Amino acid sequence: MKRIIASVTDGKGFDIGLVLLPLAFLFIMSGLPLVYNLVMSFQEVDMFSLGSFVRPFIGLKNYADLFSQSETRPILLNTAIFVSASIAGQFLIGFGLALFFWMNFPGASWLRGLFLVSWVMPGLVVGAIWNWILSGDFGVLNFFLRETGVTDGNIFWRSDPNYSLWAVIIANIWLGTSFNMILLSVGLSGIPKDLYEAAELDGANAVQRFFTITLPMMRSTIGAIIALGLIFTLQQFDLFAAITSGGPNNASNVTQYWAWDLSFRQYDFAKGATISVIMIVFVMLASVVYVRSTRHEVRG
Amino acid sequence: MSDTFRNRLMFAVALVLAAIYLFPLYWMYITALKTGSAMFATPPKFLPSEPQWGIYQYVWQSRNMGRYLWNSLVIASGAVSLIAVLGVGCAYALARYRNAWVDVGLFLILMLQVLPASLMVTPIFVGFSQFGLLDTPRLAVILAIAAKSMPFFVVLVRATFMSVPMELEEAALVDGNSRIGAFFNIVLPLARNGILVSAILIFMQSFGEFVYSKSMIQAVELQPASVGLNSFMGPNTNEWNNIMAYATIYVTPILAAFVLLQRRIVSGLTSGALK
């Protein structure tokens, strides 16, 4: 006993204790729910059996039901559009801004950091602001679009099924661009300057330098950022709750909102758990890519 | 073209870019000050002609914002304390060693970091209700947020501990300190800034948390400001000046803290996310 106490205060046991306590907490609060989620996806869960641990086991019926529902396909497609358009927008705008702020001038890093306010704000507030900006009759975005001649009339961003998903995508691009930009800036500042000097001596112009030095040197950073973008866009929930609530008629619904909607609006916890299982597997695959590319960053 | 001219030009362009990017924020502040009719004017006014400063007091009282913000504060402080107590030691131990076990631990932690809250809330809600945790909904939300955000905190703080030279700790051990003594007297003070910045970042996130609170807290008296804002925004609302005033009161403290600590937050964030 004495030896154990001595080890905890003064030896390896100290470190092991420090790690095991939080890992136990995470296991109970994240690991067990993951398993429970999987179990529920094979069970029949309704309001009456919600409180009991013993519930009828129905095999893959939840999965079969889910894929025979008519809204499943459009929502999966929406998710794909939401994720790819958001990542593309955030990455391209973020990369452009990062390249601009990379040209050193006084005040560059301070101004660049200011962009990050979009990322520290509560998602619900960002959603509320964009909800107002995107409003159909009185929204300021429609005003700009009309004045610049891009559109003739007002676009009803939130209630037109053709645009409602894009309303959330626009808000999400705004939200995530700054984070992309900051991380890309870090990557850019890691490229040795003498590479550019050598290329310039050899007569390479700015475009050639970008494609032969900047892009190849940034490869692992870009991989990490895109994987991270995938993870963050699949976590995006607040904007849907604040702007469209998945409507009209599921036109802007995506899996991560649908799973919540099924569980907490329609009280179909088994279906909610089933979608969660599918999406969590997908997110975990993405995070393996992210972890691998950050690993590469540290060692290479 | 002289260097100073180039610098000024670049700074001007950068200012314009920042102004475009931050326009939504400006629009929030301006809309809050408009009268009901000025808000729906076409073309919209970009400077309020008769700013309505009384709106903040009106919204604060009519929406009972004090209670909402207090709940947000309770939830965020609870989550941050729990995360800090559990996470700092974990980050320290993971920074001190470099072996296969540490790699496994780090990998597990990174995997937990990516689980979307809106997907995890279903099993957490059902499990918590079975164990009676939903009778204390704010505690339930604190536990759920802690599980969600701790991995991120550990990753950030681990990066801080990596930058503390191990020799200092070894010297303290040679001088007769125990491991615990060396940890509290030498390592922790040296890593204090990094830990504080990470804690502030987690605090900001928890202060705006929505999914768990919305799903688990039914009683209005216990709901945080994010849920309050959500119920303020009905589908056909036209009180946009009041909503924007609510949003202003809600985010201004966060924005102020961010602008003051900007440099530290940005460097802390980047060191953790990519390394």
Image (spheres, grey):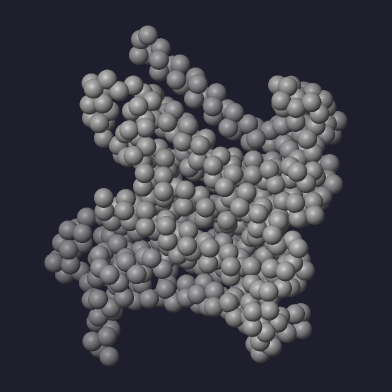
The quadrant in which residue A276 appears is bottom right
Q: Residue at x 32, y 50 (%)?
A: A297
State the residue at coordinates (75%, 31%).
A142
Give the percent coordinates (x, y) of residue A126.
65, 44
Residue A273: image location, x then y, percent: 64, 72
Q: Quadrant of residue B52?
A: top right
Q: Is residue A133 above or below residue A76?
A: above
Q: Position of residue B14 (x, y in %)?
A: 49, 25
> Relative to residue B145, is residue A66 drawn left or right?
right
- Say which residue appears at 82% left-offset and 50% top-offset: B235
Residues B115 and B73: in front is B115
Q: In screen coordinates, is B208 left or right of B1?
A: right
The quadrant of the image that shows the N terminus of chain B is top left
Residue B225 in view (yes/no):
no
> Which residue occupies 44% across, 20% down?
B10
User: x and y percent of residue B265 in the render?
Assistant: 44, 45
Vertical position of residue B229 compared to residue A42: above or below: above
Relative to A246, say whether A187 is above or below: above
